[in-house]
Image: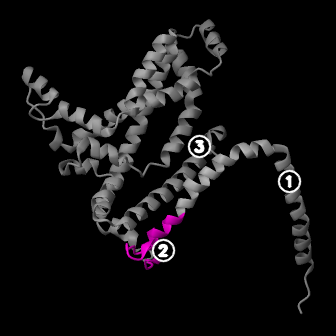
Amino acid sequence: MVEETNVEKSVSRGLMSMKPTIWKKMKGDITKYGPLYILALPGVLFLLLFSYFPMSGLILVFKNYNFKDGIFGSPWAGFDNFKFFYSSLDLAIRATRNTVMLNILFFVFTTVAAIAVAIMLNEIRSKLTIKVTQSALFIPFFISWVVIGSVLFAMLDYKNGLFNQIFEQIGLNPIDWYSNPYLWIPILVIASIWKGMGYNSIIYYAILTGFDNSIYEAAKIDGASRMQQIFKITIPLLKPTIIMLFLLAVGNMLKGDLSMIMGLTYLNPLLLPVTDIIDVFVYRTAVKTGEFAFSSAISLYQSVVGLLLILGANKIAGWYDKDSKLF
């Protein structure tokens, strides 16, 4: 029998001495913060049941799924379900490019618009005007993309659209909006701003109302104009919030809004050079044919890459400003 070395003995003694310490610390925390743990229990159970337990379905990604054998009885497929996305490399690159490009444009322009609206609301002194303005800006957030698409069609239709009728009245040629894909980059950005600006502006407005007014009073005494106060005080103070929301948005950089593209463009094939994001590509090639394993594989790919992007962006944010990190 091999004798136990001095190092192994010391490690063993260390582990034995740690166990009672950890348990004692946990017991002390539970005793001290018991009511808080009880308050958190429903949220933790909800998270486990509806967020972590469904993750067992990810096994579908590595299965050659068929209805007869079900998820757990279907044969294993390894990484074959990931191959379909890269079997058409040009389409995969186009879908990835469109997804990242649109998400960056949506975040940048929606953030700028939301901050501008929040600053405008902060400058208004009438509470009634603020409430009416907030309600008016918040309503588009609850309107579905299908309804917005119908309104958009009434404005952009080649024959009877409002815009082309105005163009004809002033002597300009009508524009065939639904056959020119590159016109849809600004259209999608404007639609995203219109729908999400009110929701995001409320977040920034809530942050603005928490700022210390003495900073602005001191700036006024020093002779700072209103615009100088905005660019030298307000926007720098909003920077941590902008970075935090950007970090949250980075996680969804490879995810697109399928309902938005379907509602606004009706998956018009002429617009696919710009509107064929990853979710649209998966819907066209996998979901419509019942290949759920393919769509699950791409969803897992998007989630894993999104997690890596968040970790990387969070690390970079930490180098820039330690207080701006998410964790």
Depth check, mark 1 against mark 3: the one in front is 1
Q: Is residue 1 above or below residue 118?
A: below
The answer to whether any part of residue 124 appears in the image is no
Q: Earlier in the sequence, mark 2 or mark 3?
A: 2
> Which of the image's four quarters has the N terminus?
bottom right
Q: Give the percent coordinates (x, y) of residue 83.
A: 37, 70
Residue interval drawn in magenta: 56-76
Q: Is residue 85 above or below residue 311?
A: below
Q: Secondary structure at mark 2?
A: helix
Report the disc number at residue 27.
1
Depth check, mark 2 against mark 3: the one in front is 2
Q: Earlier in the sequence, mark 1 or mark 2?
A: 1
Depth check, mark 1 against mark 2: the one in front is 2
> Callout 3 environment at 10 Å: few (<14), some (14 to 19), or many (20+)?
some
Q: Give the percent coordinates (x, y) of residue 189.
A: 33, 36
- What's under tag 2, amino acid-wise? Phe
- What's under tag 1, amino acid-wise? Lys
Pick whichever, 235 or 65, lies toward us.
65
Q: CA distance from mark 1 to mark 3?
A: 36 Å
Can you identify the residue that label 2 sits on? 72
Q: Is residue 246 left or right of residue 212?
A: left
- What's under tag 3, amino acid-wise? Ala
Can you identify the residue that label 3 sits on? 317
Q: CA distance from mark 1 to mark 2?
A: 39 Å
Q: Give the percent coordinates (x, y) of residue 129.
A: 46, 12
Residue ID at (62%, 21%)? 211
The image quadrant that residue 296 belongs to is bottom left
Q: Is residue 278 left or right of residue 250?
A: left
Pick whichever, 174 or 60, lies toward us.
60
Residue ID at (64%, 14%)? 213
